[in-house]
Amino acid sequence: MKTMKNGMYVLLGLMFMVTTVNCSNKKGAEKAADAAEVAAETGNVLKVSAPPFTKFVVVTVEEEGLYKEADKNSPTLVCWSESDCESDYCETIYQWSDQPGKEGFELNTDMLTYEGAVYPVLGEEGDFYKVCVYNKWCEIESAYIPKASVADIETAPVNAETFKEKSEGFYFGSRVVNDGKYKGVVISDQYSEIDGETIGVGVLVDGALATPLIYQIDAFLNNDLKEDFVIREEEGNFCINYSDKLKATEGEDGTFRIDLNKLTDEQIAKFVEEVTKKKPEFVEYMYLFPAKGPELFYYKMK
């Protein structure tokens, strides 16, 4: 899965992350499978599919594997990492434990889940749930986890109220469009020492924030820029340069960030119109769990 950024960031303080079934569980599993399979497009301006997840579970044991089949004797999901990587971005390979490793890579760890990890449910088979394990680095869609190792967890809707509190450290600001053609669009600004600044263009849909990965844009301050900002595509990814007219106050760490409150309605429209020229494929869905905070899940649009 090719992405622009290692950007699994969440709102800090306000928040903290198809099927084989047996006959007895077929009805419920098929419902979840159908939701994942058809995930019909909604009327939102980004044309992002409605979230395919209707049920979530949280791990209640200290360690548990993610299994290839609904059987604890089946292979587990494992991760291989580059052996001699000195970069911030080391290649990782996710595969099943019965597959041979790649030369130059070492087994990092079995993909044991941890207590408190949350997974979307895609179906169920006997004593196992089939859960979504997609992420920015793992292209394997699903794995099985024993029902005895998890419990149901409830969600709360993500809406405009969610973004009213500014959270230093991850999202430095968010701008929610509350009316008009682009109602429900959320422009967010996030920063990390490794990745720098990223501007995300997402949309509120069915109680979640959906942000296509391709709409997470590398952002750079350019004091020589005559326009307020310029969005361009480079090697399949978007990036943006913005002028000092849109610059926020310099942070204590000496970094500069865009001030989303300075964007006009016309500039927000330009953001949306530019990025939506490229059809989204992988989508990051942010859900809010009252008992835990926010979690990010990933899905490939059908």
Image (cartoon, rainbow, N blue to C red):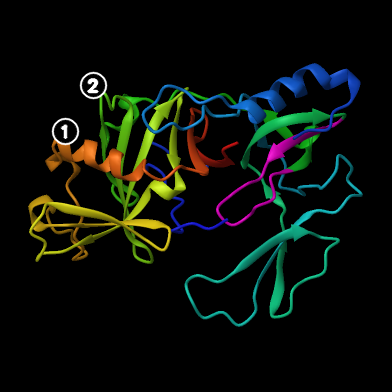
**Residue 16 shows in the view:** no
Q: Position of residue 168 (x, y in %)?
A: 28, 48
Image quarter where the N terminus lies is bottom right
| Residue pictured at 23% horizontal, 36% vertical | 269
Q: Nearer the viewer, residue 113 or 159?
A: 159
Q: Is residue 180 left or right of residue 302?
A: left
Q: In percent of the image, x 36 and y 40: which residue is there?
A: 276
Please, is residue 64 above or below residue 242 in the view? Answer: above
Front residue of 107 and 42: 42
Residue 254 makes an appearance in the image: yes
Q: Are marks 2 and 1 in contact (CB under 8 Å)?
A: yes
Q: Is residue 98 left or right of residue 40?
A: right
Q: Which mark is residue 265?
A: 1
- Return the mark for residue 180: 2
Q: Secondary structure at mark 1?
A: helix
| Amino acid type, label 2 | Gly
Q: Residue at x 39, y 28 (%)?
A: 204
Q: Which residues are magenta?
A: 127-142
**Residue 151 placement: quadrant:** top right
Query: How would you rate the neighbour count of disc 1 (Cα within 10 Å): few for under 14, some for 14-19, many for 20 or more?
Result: few
Q: Quadrant of the C terminus?
A: top right
